[in-house]
Amino acid sequence: MIDIAVLGAGPAGMAAATQAAQRGASVVLFDESPAPGGQVYRAAPAGYAMPRDADRAEGDALRAALAASNAVVRTGHRVWGVGGGPLVPLGEAAAPFRLDALAPDGSNTITEARALVLATGTHERIIPFPGWTLPGVLGLAAATILLKANGVLPGRRVVVAGAGPLLYAVAAKLAKAGATVAAVVDLAATSEWIAALPALMARPDLLARGAAWRASLTLKGVPVLAAHRIVAAEGVGVLQRVRVAPLAGGDYRVFDCDALTIGHGLVPATEATRAFRAAHRYVAESGGWVPVLDEDRRTSIPLLYACGDGSGVRGAAAAPASGRVAALAALRDLGLIDAASHATSRASPAADFARASRAGGAMARMMALRPALVAAIPPETIICRCEGVTRAQIEAAVEDGATAMNQVKQFTRCGMGPCQGRLCGEAAAELVAARVGGREKAGFATGRVPLRPVAMDALLGDFDYADIPVPRPAPI
Amino acid sequence: MDAIAGRDMLTSVADDLRIAGMTRPAPVAFTFDGVELRAPEGESLAAALIASGIRRLGEGLDPARPRAALCMMGVCQQCLVRVDGRLAQSCLVPVRAGMLVAPA
Amino acid sequence: MSAPFDVAVIGAGVMGCSTALHLARAGMKTVLLDRGAICREASGVNAGTLTMQMTRAALVPYALRAHEMWMRMAEWCDGGHVQAVDCPGLSVAFTEHEIAMLEERAHFRRQAGAPIEIVSTARAREIEPGLSDKALLAGHCPIDGFTSAYLTGRAFRPALLNAGVELREDTAVRGIQPGFSIDTEAGELRATRVVLAGGVWLQDMAAWLGITLPIKVLINQLVVTERLPPVMRTVLGVASGLLSLKQYANGTVLIGGGWQGIGDRERGGLAVKPDSFLGNVRLAAHTIPALRDARVVRSWLGLEAETADALPAIGPIPGVPDAWIIGSVHSGYTSGPYMGKLLAQAICGQAPELPLFPIDRLLAKDQAA
């Protein structure tokens, strides 16, 4: 049994694991990617020399500190099972946390830990529109991974659409790398960016970088359409063009393209906290449902902590500090540091987090779900692509009496497929919420293992029939 | 093949979609649906397929066909393929020499 | 206060829905209450298996009639249905011990009316080409099948409303006073009769009426794969009954069999046990080897009620006139709609087609009638 397991090796998880290990705890850090870094600070594959940028430097610094610590890093591990903690029979004391993970060689590993720090990050929100299932349409975060971790363009002629700072980062990067940016389609009005400026003043570096991105696009003559949305993606077999219209309505414009990168914000990945039945609350400007946390990032479950964007979107710059605060709380709760040491140690990361949250929070607000975008989805558009469930079918289920997400899922199969509701969940919940009176009422699907689809072959291993612990049969 | 039709549309413009001027490992050969492709060792398979102009990854069994990379971070499950016979998310698999990739 | 209901059915699972529907159609003014949503507990999350080979022998006559009801649900449920599939079922033995169990169990079920024949592996693999060649012997029952249980609430709802049932979801009952006055979160309501149909919560419900009825809670685990090409075409089980396997039209394969997870009636189905999860999928892949190629996508838990003798609690509540109970039917979903129909017959003063399962046997002597 180890002291602390950390799930997710992005900036929050790397910092949490490093902090905990530096203070003498036995720590294991898990991530399904081949190297630590997470999405924003994703490492380039071995043998690549990528251009240096601010993100790369931040990520390398976190990676270096992690490597210098005694934390055990298990990358390439797909954690599919979470258990223990409060998930014990009634009346029994809480158990150690248990993580089941598939190792790169396909074997199943089991790790027991006294405390568990969740740093599971986010996934991208894409509010569906006709044609969003066409090959050539991909996420905005996906585009950054393609560009920064692989040095690959999503297409030659690209429309960049959605919300938040990634929009301009991706567009500028694409243009610099030689792609034609056919258009930048920003959900936000110019006035929203201006309103965000005071909060961004705390990070002049980001502000300058954002200004440079925009300037480079202007220089190249890229059309930047504020308060616009993608109405449809079209093409025969693959994407060939998009239709773009003002959010407020009005005539659409057509842009030929071979790729559309689109993202409508980030959604905290709360599968694990949901599986542990931690308390959650809905905070639109934090990305959606988030675990309820105290100021030291304790969830409602003893010895379970959450940090980074997975506990509420505040951006990569704020994530390491939140990871350190969570790690210090875990160290304190495990008795590995005393109260005085905890109080002294937490002050600096707590202040860092508050500072970084200001700019991060402003960006998160910009990326918050926009109900108008959901309202504009045509009835026959597929919401759940795994199961082929349309908006009309979801609304019919609500008409038939399904008033919460768990039951909408049963009535329609929306969210039952391999993405486990991550892709459709936001739009579907918003459609339900509009009819039942809010996201809190619509709720969320119960968290269950496996946290990700898991290959039976790897899970099964070699076994003898005689070794299967078949329970006693029921009476005849 | 549809997948190859997708390739044709992009590769009529240029050889591949890799950004020039970067140091990469030497390309290795692998096959997708019987077609030999080359990509730097360690590049994500999904990226390698996109770079080669292949965006339709297969017809799949889910209603919203075809399969195509969407999130690139292991979440969406849309880029599922078979690698050496086993199901795998192409965005999470690094390219290796000789790997046999097929639509799933 | 408005006029009392003729009957209040508490618990909107398959038993409560069927009872309420049949009572309303017999002319009773019926209210159907549930603390949550219709068929959101066991009735909506079970494996939907309509097999005779996991049904207790004593329940086979009921399950056979219920099988017919499920298959024809649209006809008696105003078009509502659960995508029931009629297909053969196989129960497989892999060891000598299981062969003995298979033959014994098939014998008792056959006596009860289930047309089960013991067949060779070769014959079993003609019926189910996906079956492992490791099987030694199989019980074959041509009457088997399955439903999409998650559609059950949606299937019942329109018929209930058409029949005039007042459906009150998200309305928890807190207690019942003689008469009956039913105390709910949304106020008091009155009914001439009550039917307790609360699944694993029957123990608490019986206590409202001063009855001590111990109900054991089973936390049944289910696992489902993503869509696969066709790998099987029957309902498959093993002789011990601890596997149920079927492939839906959409390609997903549902793996059940009653492996136990963690949970209780207070907290619901909390978590699967990793060892049960692994054991269940290994048993499944041992039976249908093609499953080795699948990916598991989801798992969940459903709560099943069981009485001391694992036979149903269906009938009048002793000492409380006009109070009835229905539940704790082993493989209760399979027989559910028929059980509700039977109880409705009894409540309406008719002789039920088949005997009920009065609960006197389960009560302490001073409580039994």
Image: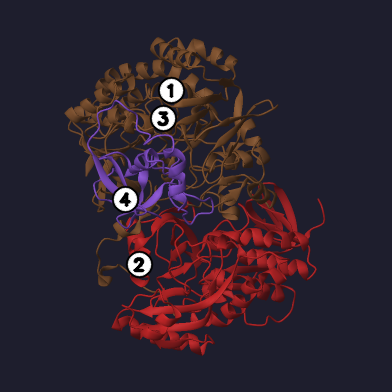
Alpha-carbon distance for marks 4 and 1?
Answer: 31 Å
Nearer to us: label 1 or label 2: 1
In this figure, which residue is indicated by the disc labeled 4? B31
Disc marking residue C285: 2
Marker count (numbered): 4
Disc marking residue A309: 3
Nearer to us: label 1 or label 3: 1
Q: Colour of chain B?
A: purple
Nearer to us: label 4 or label 2: 4
Under mark 3, the amino acid is Asp
Tell me which chain the residue with mark 2 is part of: C
Alpha-carbon distance for marks 4 and 2?
Answer: 30 Å
In this figure, which residue is indicated by the disc labeled 1? A175
Residue contact between numbered discs 4 and 1, judged by CB atoms under 8 Å: no
Alpha-carbon distance for marks 2 and 3?
Answer: 38 Å
Q: Colour of chain C?
A: red
Q: Do pointers 4 and 1 mark residues of a single chain?
A: no
Q: Do pointers 1 and 3 mark residues of a single chain?
A: yes
Image position, residue C52 (x, y; %): 51, 79
Task: Name the side, left or right, on which C47 lies relative to C187.
Answer: left
